[in-house]
Image (cartoon, rainbow, N blue to C red):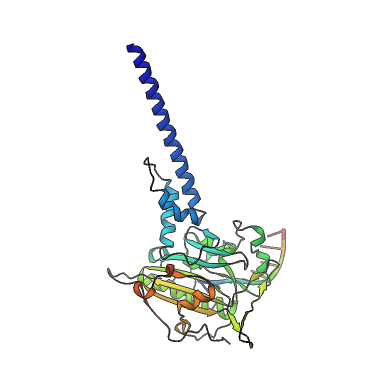
Amino acid sequence: MNSRWQALIVVLGTAVTCFLAGAYFQHDHATRQLQKLVQHDPYAYYVSSKIFKFQFFKIPQDKALSAQRVRLEDIMKYGYPGLDDIHLYSDFVLSYDRRNRVAHWVCEHLRADALGSAAITDRGRGRVRSRSRISYRPDLSVPSNFRAALADYRNSGFDRGHLAAAGNHRTHCDETFYLTNIAPQIGRGFNRAAWNKLEIYVRNLTLRYGSVYVFTGPIYKPKARSNGNWSIEYEMIGSNMVAVPTHFFKVLIVESKLPQGKPYMEAYVLPNARIPDNINLRDYLCDIREIEHYAGLQFFNGLRRSRIFGSNFPRSSQVFQNFG
DNA sequence: TTTCATGT
């Protein structure tokens, strides 16, 4: 009798232990799979916070993965302007436009400590060598029929212009050279002049205020037709037909160092064209609603911007004007 | 600081 009870207790104990162990390992496995999925699937990212709530056991998170998740949440702090074909990189997030073979938008979070001191002038010194070793390359995470190739840009007459600027990223600079982060830009008078000037301005803002969020992307601007309708015309380069945007935008959010300081927001739109050397960047300030209208994006999840941001608001925006 | 052209 006694020994039969003992045997029963041992059997039951073993069964319960095995069950708990099995449940634990299955839960551990499922959680890790979910953490991996979150890296590639924006939907999984959004629902993960709900799923992660149901934690029966305390499971140590994969350190590298959770660091990546923290970084992602940091970069996208002000929301996703769109959710089309999201690609995650170490230091920036990008939404890819398969039809045009150019990104919809790229988002970066720049910090003064990560930027270093080399960014203040437009004269390169020392660091140039590290960049010269990096080569442009197609992004294999895009299906080949939607992918831009090096040959598309060769002899096209256009520069391979960075959206997330190479100069913004010291440690993961190589990732900015994927063609997903590249768009055809007029070289002289734009990419190597006014656009570069804007990028330097953004880096200087970062060095001065410490923390700046940047959204960058293309615009394909419609023109008025004589019959009262509109039409869009833009070039495409190479056999993959990579679209040449008519304009590029940058939306900046400068975070204040003051304890109660509002973040400051401003937006720029520049035509992808030869721009005179002596321009004032302020002339290209733009109402963010125009960018949203033309690019089909929505910034800050549609929140009332005036409530959260101080901003530099142009009285009359240039986007509606025709640039020579 | 942006880039291009040429080759293996």
Give the vertical position of A13 relative to A91 (above or below): above
Q: Which residue is drawn at 47% across and 47% down?
A: A34
Q: In the drawing, does residue A85 fall left or right of residue A212?
A: right
Give the vertical position of A189 relative to A108 (above or below): below
**Based on the displayed image, in which of its 4 quarters is residue A110 positioned?**
bottom left
**Based on the displayed image, in which of its 4 quarters is residue A310 positioned?**
bottom left
Q: In the drawing, does residue A236 fall left or right of residue A219?
A: right
Q: Which of A277 and A1 is in front in this view?
A: A1
The C terminus of chain A lies in quadrant: bottom right
Q: Residue A116, percent across and down?
A: 41, 65
Q: In the rendered picture of this protein, how many numbered marks are placed on residues?
A: 0
Q: Which of A48 and A119 is in front in this view?
A: A48
Q: Which residue is drawn at 66% across and 73% down?
A: A236
Q: Nearer the viewer, residue A206 or A102?
A: A102
Q: Residue A278, percent across and down?
A: 50, 86
**Can residue A199 be seen by looking at this rendering?**
no
Q: Which of A305 and A107 is in front in this view?
A: A305
Q: Which residue lies furthest to the front in this view?
A: A1
Q: Residue A167, percent across and down?
A: 49, 68
Q: Which residue lies furthest to the left in this view?
A: A259
Q: Residue A77, percent across and down?
A: 40, 63
The N terminus of chain A lies in quadrant: top left
**Based on the displayed image, in which of its 4 quarters is residue A276 positioned?**
bottom right
**Can residue A266 be seen by looking at this rendering?**
yes
